[in-house]
Amino acid sequence: MNKKTIAERAQILRLLTEGNSLRSTSRIAGCSINTVTKLLTEIGEACAWYQDKHLVNLPCKKVQVDEIWSFVYSKQKNVPEGMEADAGDVWTWVAIDSETKLVPSWRIGSRDAAIASEFIGDLASRMAGRIQLTSDGYKIYENAVENAFGADVDYAMLVKIYGDTVEGQKRYSPAACVGAKKAKITGNPDLCCVSTSHVERQNLTMRMSMRRFTRLTNAFSKKVENHAHAVALHYMNYNFCRQHKTLRVSPAMAAGVSQTLWDLEDVVKMADAYHYDKDRGKLTYSN
């Protein structure tokens, strides 16, 4: 079977990371949807591995966390009998550094205490020093942060207060936010910096950049594995390939993880090296 060139594969990735669905990408790139899906799987696996290996000992100081909803195969109320483990609501837990805009950690799973503990524990393992952490008022975060950081964190919650509107709560948006309360939980957080604005903006970036996160479409994920691959590719592109307009460098460069601005062709080359080493039984690639 002929293998597409690095430039051709990078073009497919470019279409995917700009919010195109698998089918529209296959039409624009002039290839089969199976080719696009296989490439997403291969690149997504390599991107997850690369970021897990290199996003460590990070100099982050102010970190915000949040979770964003999506679904796989069908919405929770429509999950067929016998598919409860593979379909339904899926939450993506995301952390972002307010200063470098780097996304150092994310987790995909349910919205429960177990996944929260995994997510916050992974985040804590990647930090080089003490951080100020902000979350919304979701109570599950408290135990997760205490178990992962102990007292070595300045942690606060931003609890939003919602009020009734004339129209009431709409189907795809919460009621109007009429205020917010900042609450110290652990340590001595600077209340002036207690905010979830950056991570909520990152949630919008996810919905705009990944077609499967767009509401009211038929482009939702059909398998949770492909969902995870798409998220890994998105954050590889976001962290390493996209120049942040306010920083004038990529988030990875701002955080000292990378010395250069990557291109998606570099991502393809990284994935090729990863799979080559994986086939030989060892992973030695570095950049």
Image (cartoon, rainbow, N blue to C red):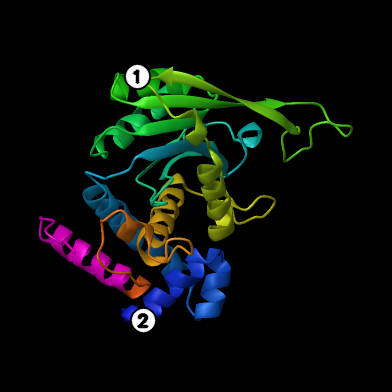
Of tags 2 and 1, the one toward the viewer is: 1
Task: Give the image location of residue 187, x and y in percent.
Answer: 36, 20
Question: Element at badge 1?
Answer: helix
Task: Give the image location of residue 216, x and y in percent.
Answer: 70, 51
Tag 2: residue type? Ala
Tag 1: residue type? Glu
- Residue drawn at (44%, 18%) of the image: 185
Q: Residues within 10 Å of mark 1 (few under 14, many from 20)?
A: some
Residue at the disc numbered 1:
146
The boundaries of the magenta stretch are: 266-287
Give the vertical position of 73 relative to 146 (above or below): below
Residue 97 on the magenta segment: no
Report the side of 36 relative to 22 (left or right): left
Q: Quadrant of residue 41?
A: bottom left
Task: Give the image location of residue 8, x and y in percent.
Answer: 39, 80
- Residue drawn at (37%, 71%) of the image: 264
Report the side of 133 relative to 279 (left or right): right
Report the side of 257 relative to 251 (left or right): left
Residue 279 on the magenta segment: yes
First along the sequence among labels 2 and 1: 2
Task: Give the image location of residue 249, x and y in percent.
Answer: 38, 65
Residue at the disc numbered 2:
7
